[in-house]
Image (cartoon, helix red, strand yellow):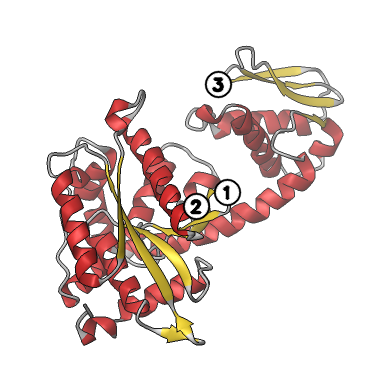
């Protein structure tokens, strides 16, 4: 099945192709796994990739998409979603795999379990069909939500830089997000143009959950104040990611690997206070990742000021996660992980 000619020529397809190449690094002719839930975002991504699979460049097809639908078995409509995606793939002529996961049967947080098992399922199929890339349909509005949540939790640059266009998924597999420069309304408009129906997951709008509350009460206000705020958020995330990478290079040079726990005080004292604080945070989160939301900037700044001060008397700073930073006349040491 070919999509309507207006859809095949739609700007959305060109944007997806450009972002696959320039931002995600997907080569022409590559096999690409697409995670498709049946919602408008993933259906739009599937539709664009199906169009690209019928185009040729340099003597080969532009893209070889394979769809994976992961059934989480968390809603009564989950089986209907799976059937819809299977039927859609048959009509579009796209290879399709279905995977079942049961996050509610695992110990711990159901949402965290679902995410972990979902990516594992996508990676499993990618290895089976020898696809080096796995694409998911996170878009600019999702990026804005992620950054707002990170900001409110007091995250550092890692959190504020949001979701990456590409990152390692599992070994040599790469996870890509080619829709980050687009918005949900773009996905829905393309589906309408392409005559592609989609499923709605009511849990996405559940206002008892953080993201659902943001979608209902916060994002509409931001959109009213700053139109295209979702797209702008992706630009801000890109700028923060570049700053983060530059800072990480300096921290690697000044503090060594993130696993390093002791440093020469005189060497650190030569650094700007924000860099000292960033290096201490990097080491602390490597030692105790769970304290990301509780290790405040004030605590880091106080320690950085003590390291740079002329006062050479020993000092200790007690941080969350049973971490203790000791500053002596010659040494700065992070320890006290009594229960590790």
Nearer mark to the viewer, of 1 and 3: 1
Q: Give the Cα separation between the discs numbered 1 and 3.
A: 32 Å
Nearest to the observer: residue 40 or residue 326: 40
Nearer mark to the viewer, of 1 and 2: 1
Q: Is residue 225 left or right of residue 263?
A: left
Residue displayed at 50% across by 73% down: 21
Q: Is residue 76 above or below residue 61?
A: above
Residue displayed at 55% across by 56% down: 241
Q: Residue furthest top?
A: 338
Place of residue 125 in the rendered image (x, y in percent of width and height, measured from the top left): 41, 52
The reply to whether residue 188 is in sight is no
Image quadrant assignment for residue 256: top right
Residue displayed at 36% across by 23% down: 107
Q: Is residue 86 above or below residue 319?
A: below
Nearest to the observer: residue 4 or residue 254: 4
10 Å crowding of disc 1: few (<14), some (14-19), many (20+): few
**Location of mark 1 (residue):** 171
The reply to whether residue 140 is in sight is yes
Q: Give the Cα separation between the discs numbered 2 and 3.
A: 24 Å
Labelled pair 2, 3 in contact (Cβ < 8 Å): no
Image quadrant assignment for residue 333: top right
Q: Is residue 269 above or below residue 221?
A: above
10 Å crowding of disc 2: few (<14), some (14-19), many (20+): many
Point out which mark residue 161 bears. Answer: 2
Q: Secondary structure at mark 2?
A: loop
Q: Secondary structure at mark 3?
A: loop
**Mark before the other along the chain sequence, 2 or 3:** 2
Point out which mark residue 100 bears. Answer: none
């Amino acid at each position: 099945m070919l999509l309507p000619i207006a859809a095949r020529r739609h700007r959305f397809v060109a944007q997806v192709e450009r972002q696959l190449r320039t931002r995600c690094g997907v080569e022409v002719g590559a096999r690409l796994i697409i995670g498709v839930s049946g919602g408008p975002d993933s259906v739009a991504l599937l539709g664009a990739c199906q169009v690209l699979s019928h185009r040729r460049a340099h003597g080969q097809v532009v893209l070889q998409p394979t769809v994976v639908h992961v059934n989480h078995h968390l809603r009564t409509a989950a089986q209907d979603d799976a059937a819809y995606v299977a039927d859609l793939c048959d009509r579009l002529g796209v290879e399709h795999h279905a995977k079942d996961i049961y996050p509610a049967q695992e110990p711990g947080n159901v949402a965290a379990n679902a995410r972990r098992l979902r990516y594992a399922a996508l990676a499993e199929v990618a290895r089976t069909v020898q696809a080096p890339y796995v694409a998911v349909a996170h878009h600019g509005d999702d990026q804005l939500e992620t950054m707002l949540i990170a900001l409110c939790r007091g995250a550092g640059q890692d959190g504020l830089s949001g979701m990456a266009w590409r990152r390692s998924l599992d070994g040599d597999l790469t996870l890509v997000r080619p829709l980050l420069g687009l918005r949900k309304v773009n996905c829905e408009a393309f589906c309408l143009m392409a005559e592609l129906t989609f499923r709605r997951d009511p849990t996405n709008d559940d206002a008892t959950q953080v993201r659902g509350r943001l979608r209902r009460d916060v994002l509409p206000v931001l959109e009213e104040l700053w139109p295209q705020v979702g797209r702008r958020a992706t630009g801000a995330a890109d700028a923060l990611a570049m700053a983060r990478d530059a800072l990480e290079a300096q921290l690697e040079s000044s503090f060594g690997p993130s696993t390093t726990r002791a440093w020469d005080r005189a060497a650190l004292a030569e650094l700007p206070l924000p860099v000292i604080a960033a290096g201490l945070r990097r080491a602390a989160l490597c030692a105790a990742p769970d304290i990301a939301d509780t290790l405040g900037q004030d605590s880091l700044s106080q320690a950085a000021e003590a390291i740079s001060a002329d006062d050479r008397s020993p000092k200790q700073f007690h941080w969350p996660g049973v971490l203790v930073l000791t500053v002596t006349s010659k040494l700065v040491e992070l320890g006290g992980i009594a229960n590790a």
